[in-house]
Image: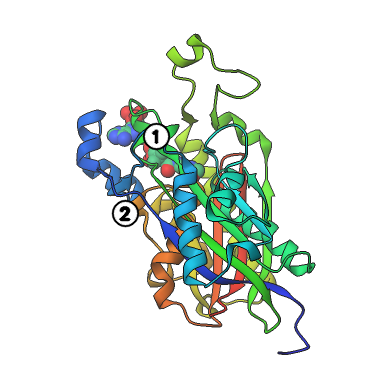
């Protein structure tokens, strides 16, 4: 243990889960006027996972991810102090899906809540959880990012249904005093982004009625090209800023871990950072945009290529608008 380091929150375990059912571009082409070629070249997505079945909500994904995480890290669920669930598709408007997950996994001593920050939810959750570790208030924090986007996607709208999928993951945060862990975060939001990306009905402003249902207002509404422009600019800005203020050169960074919304947004961000394509975590082709799930799903897919001490930059952009970046050193 090195006395020169203050307490940071380190990721000491990662697990993720996606449902089995695969929705391919070919199948989507039979549902709306689109093609495999259009989807692949414009987004980089080939297929996405869909959670099927009655009464299957986001907690199904979160429970599977957290159970696996606790098992593989040998963590007694009763020792978890806090569970944060980042999601935009909670099981119900209340209670929090985090409460449902914590109860199901036996995290009986944890307090839990949901965090809604659109596609930036996971990094907002990571940063929030890290504060509780840094202050000493908590010793074990679970951060889950999970979404069942298929529950709010209009499969008659070709501009959105091709993008989204279901899935998620979870990390365990524990104190580290060896220079590893979450070293810097930048979180941003701009509520004027509401215009371009929202769900019109089902909240307190416009509760569900027969009219809202027949007008298809309980689905994601997105002005794609406007969101695209904000995403490219803002995700790159925070990623470049976090590099500069931590004196990181492109070669210092083992991986960029970007939110997976569109491969073209990811490539533009990496280019502005000077990161070469082989150091971008990418699985958008398999899962599409799982909102709060993308970053833990990436970390899980690439975990065997990570080494203790690796410098990672996480970056995301989403509804709100919200965006941000996290700089961390991999701890195991
Ligand atoms: O994760 C949360 C934040 N969200 C994002 O970051 C998403 C950001 N936006 C995007 O990724 C892209 O804007 C989309 C993938 C949603 C759309 O790609 P785009 O290159 O911006 O296309 P566009 O909206 O400018 O549309 C270009 C054309 C239009 O036709 P016209 O008007 O030029 O005739 C669309 O109607 O492509 C058409 N189009 C499609 N064609 C075939 C839109 N969706 C489709 C489709 N298949 N699925």
Mark 1: few, some, or many residues within 10 Å (few <14, many ≥20)? some
> For mark 2, what is the residue?
286
Q: Residue at x 34, y 36 (%)?
A: 53
Mark 2: few, some, or many residues within 10 Å (few <14, many ≥20)? some
Looking at the image, residue 267 lies above or below residue 114: below
Quick one: which residue is furthest to the top in this view?
Answer: 211
Q: Residue at x 24, y 42 (%)?
A: 25
Q: Nearer the viewer, residue 316 or 38?
A: 316
The CA distance from mark 1 to mark 2 is: 17 Å
Give x and y (percent) for residue 277. Answer: 39, 68
Give x and y (percent) for residue 136. Answer: 78, 69
Q: Nearer the viewer, residue 123 or 96?
A: 96
On the question of residue 29 being in view, the answer is yes
Looking at the image, residue 303 lies above or below residue 229: below
What colouring method underlies this structural image?
Answer: rainbow
Q: Does label 1 point to a residue whose CB lies under 8 Å from ligand 1?
A: yes
Q: Residue at x 39, y 61 (%)?
A: 282
Q: Nearer the viewer, residue 121 or 319?
A: 121
Disc marking residue 160: 1
Give x and y (percent) for residue 307. Answer: 48, 82
Q: Total marks drawn?
A: 2
């Amino acid at each position: 243990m090195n006395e020169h380091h203050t307490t940071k929150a380190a990721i000491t375990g990662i697990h993720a889960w996606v449902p089995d059912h695969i929705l391919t571009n070919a199948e989507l082409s039979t549902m709306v006027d689109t093609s495999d070629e259009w989807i692949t070249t414009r987004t980089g997505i080939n297929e996405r996972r869909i959670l099927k079945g009655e009464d299957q909500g986001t907690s199904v994904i979160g429970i599977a991810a957290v159970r696996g995480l606790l098992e593989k890290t040998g963590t007694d669920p009763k020792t978890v102090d806090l569970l944060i669930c980042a999601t935009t598709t909670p099981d119900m408007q209340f209670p929090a899906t985090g409460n449902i997950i914590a109860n199901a996994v036996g995290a009986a001593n944890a307090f839990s809540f949901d965090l809604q920050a659109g596609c930036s939810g996971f990094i907002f959750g990571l940063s929030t959880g890290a504060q509780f570790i840094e202050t000493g208030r908590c010793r074990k924090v679970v951060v889950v990012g999970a979404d069942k986007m298929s529950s709010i996607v209009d499969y008659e709208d070709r501009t959105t249904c091709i993008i989204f999928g279901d899935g998620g993951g979870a990390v365990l945060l524990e104190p580290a005093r060896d220079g590893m862990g979450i070293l810097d975060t930048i979180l941003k939001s701009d509520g004027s982004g509401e215009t371009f990306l929202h769900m019109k009905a089902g909240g307190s402003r416009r509760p569900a009625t027969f009219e809202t249902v027949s007008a298809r207002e309980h689905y994601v509404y997105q002005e794609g090209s406007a969101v695209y422009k904000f995403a490219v600019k803002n995700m790159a800005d925070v990623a470049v800023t976090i590099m500069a203020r931590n004196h990181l050169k492109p070669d210092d960074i083992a991986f960029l871990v970007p939110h997976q919304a569109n491969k073209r947004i990811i490539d533009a961000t990496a280019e502005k950072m000077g990161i070469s394509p082989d150091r971008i975590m990418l699985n958008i082709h398999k899962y599409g945009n799982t909102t709060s799930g993308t970053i833990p799903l990436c970390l899980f897919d690439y975990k065997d290529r990570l080494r203790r001490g690796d410098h990672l930059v996480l970056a995301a952009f989403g509804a709100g608008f919200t965006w941000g970046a996290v700089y961390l050193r991999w701890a195991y």
